[in-house]
Image (cartoon, helix red, strand yellow):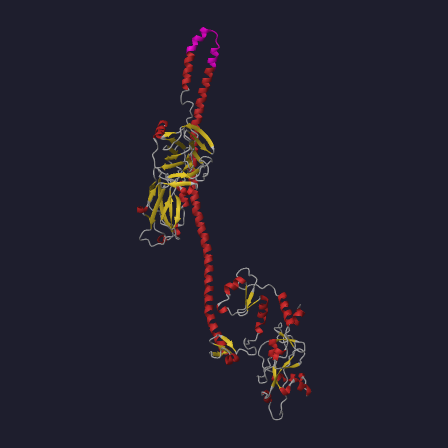
Amino acid sequence: MEEMEEELKCPVCGSFYREPIILPCSHSLCLSCARNILVQTPDSESPQSRRASGVSDYDYLDLDKMSLYSEADSGYGSYGGFASAPTTPCQKSPNGVRVFPPAMPPPQQPHHHSSAALLLPMIGPRNSCLTCPQCHRSLILDERGLRGFAKNRVLEGVIERYQQSKAAALRCQLCEKSPKEATVMCEQCDVFYCEPCRLRCHPPRGPLAKHRLLPPAQGRVSRRLSPRKISTCTDHELENHSMYCVQCKMPVCYQCLEEGKHSSHEVKALGAMWKLHKSQLSQALNGLSDRAKEAKEFLVQLRNMVQQIQENSVEFEACLVAQCDALIDALNRRKVQLLSRVNKEHEHKLKVVRDQISHCTVKLRQTTGLMEYCLEVIKENDPSGFLQISDALIRRVHLTEDQWGKGTLTPRMNTDFDLNLDSAPLLQSIHQLDFVQMKVPSLVPAPPLLHLEECCNHNNSATLSWKQPSMSMVQTEGYILELDDGNGGQFREVFVGKETMCTVDGLHFNSTYSARVKAFNKTGVSLYSKTLILQTSEVAWFAFNPGSAHPDIIFSNDNLTVTCNSYDDRVVLGKSGFSKGVHYWELTIDRYDNHPDPAFGVARVEVMKDVMLGKDDKAWAMYVDNNRSWFMHNNSHTNRTEGGITKGATVGVLLDFTRRTLTFSINEEQQGPVAFENMEGLFFPAVSLNRNVQVTIHTGLPVPEFYTSRASLQA
């Protein structure tokens, strides 16, 4: 492979051939290299005439002291004419091939002219001459110039395939982590990009739109060859850049100024602008260097902060552990004290029970002895002897029996320990443990003020409103609303947000709730507002709920009256749900045709809506026709009772969570026994009916007399 690579390199520039041309001697050259070693000779001094006169090309090796000016550091000379300043020629190319300069005409008057006369330009017509750097054969070009030589397409293709096969996968130079494979290389930016980085850092618009993007392999070759690249005009291949167009901000050649689009633009010397831009870039770099220095100092400061944070963290953790350990020690000491009280209670209970065991054992032994004696006396066959002691024994037996009177065989001590540990305040304090010493009091929000004019409750819903104090200047990020359980229990969060008004639904009827609000921001949490007492309605006012009904249900009278457009039974629920208290409502039969059997009762929210109420385990109901009724739950029928309904009849439903019972009535008289017991959870009023029935619900009613009188009798 290495030998092959040498064969693919130009003998002049030592790099891979670029746009190679084939010389008549079968050797190849880069087009740019051929242009650089091309010389102009007088017509009278062509290589053929020199050979005819007996002068060899090798004789011109003595012209080293009059070598042509070298324009690049690539190792070859540019033979632009004999008027160039003399320098030491570069006799070899990078590949070691000797490059000969073109022939010079012999001096015409060697006797009285100085050597400087050799540097005078020749007058007369000139021809283009090219000398092969490998076989040293001189070639005269016709009027076509270098365009007369054929391009070596085969060699160019071989070089391209060789570079592609040898080049490894190039990586993106802008990826921060795990660089991806590069897809393009910008020739002007000299940077390899993957596709995401190209779209982000090198968009195809704006000032970067004119940049040339190359495949990675080609870009790699271009990067390697760029140090030896000669800056020539893109519009005029034979002209080098010599001026700088201030308006277009680009280098131009003389021909561009004479006949091109830059003829009327302001131009400056290329070298002067080069030095000026270098100076400007250096000044900009000085400012950037100052920023980089400041950044380094800042990084040192941040690293010191990291160390300080680690040290402070260790110290703070140790302090926190010590504080928590002190709390745990106090809790352990209190635990020992409480356990001592439990042990005392334990010993007291054991002593009482053991004393009662001992006393009962003695009495039982005496009673057993008396019983055995009496049994022996009963065996006596002598009546007179028996009667002599029978009266005394009978009195003694009665006396002993009286000693086993009421309470004697009742334990004097129960087994339960009536010591209920109240840990709720301590748990609440533990949950409220916080780093208050880290909070700046002036930055913590002030406690919110309850806006009592806008606070209200309806049925089992409560609406609360609050606001920040008018003099408070601290920014608030949100609020936390807390309610207790309606029985004076622990508070719980029911709302967290930025709003200053909240409605809480689903509260228990006939219950008293306590509500409070606190504000918070990034600094901390404020104190609580004043506690507001809320009393929910004693009785429930509600209507049927269209949102939870079967689609066949028809609503009217502000959703208080319902019927159905189907012959099959369909279920509709009430809007309010109950889980606590005593609730009673009635349903009036507005229409009753063809003796259907509607059902009335309660149900869970997920009850089946397309069957009779009570067919599944999510409903508890009484279904009734014109003669009798049944109770039904989970498709089980019980308690058939005589007495039905007609148009105008009233069906009552009474749900009592105090006794956990469900009772039904027809026309204000209880229908059958208590229908269902052990009622726990959330229940909604429910009805199932078909198109032959229409009912209207009546709510907010007091408990009927038949139920209150029965309750008083049971008490």
* Residue numbers of the magenta segment: 372-391
Q: Quadrant of the C terminus?
A: top left
Tell which residue pokes out farthest to the front in this image: 594
Tell which residue pokes out farthest to the bottom in this image: 112
On screen, 173 above or below 319? below
Magenta span contains residue 154: no
On screen, 348 above or below 200? above
Give how far across and how far down residue 263 sits, in percent. 49, 79
Examine the rendering and report whether any part of residue 405 can be seen.
yes
Give how far across and how far down residue 465 sits, in percent. 34, 47
On screen, 437 above or below 684? below
Give how far across and how far down residue 680 sits, in percent. 42, 35
Examine the image and state in which quarter residue 428 appears.
top left
Examine the rendering and report whether any part of residue 584 can be seen.
no
For the point 55% across and 60% down, the residue is: 178
**Front position in the image: 87 or 411:** 87
Numbered label tally: 0
Position of residue 241 in the picture relative to residue 320 (left or right):
right
**Front position in the image: 317 or 174:** 174
For the point 61% across and 80% down, the residue is: 145
Give how far across and how far down residue 365 sits, in percent. 46, 19
Q: Quadrant of the N terminus?
A: bottom right
**Front position in the image: 407 or 486:** 486
Examine the image and state in which quarter residue 686 appears.
top left
Predominant secondary structure, magenta span: helix
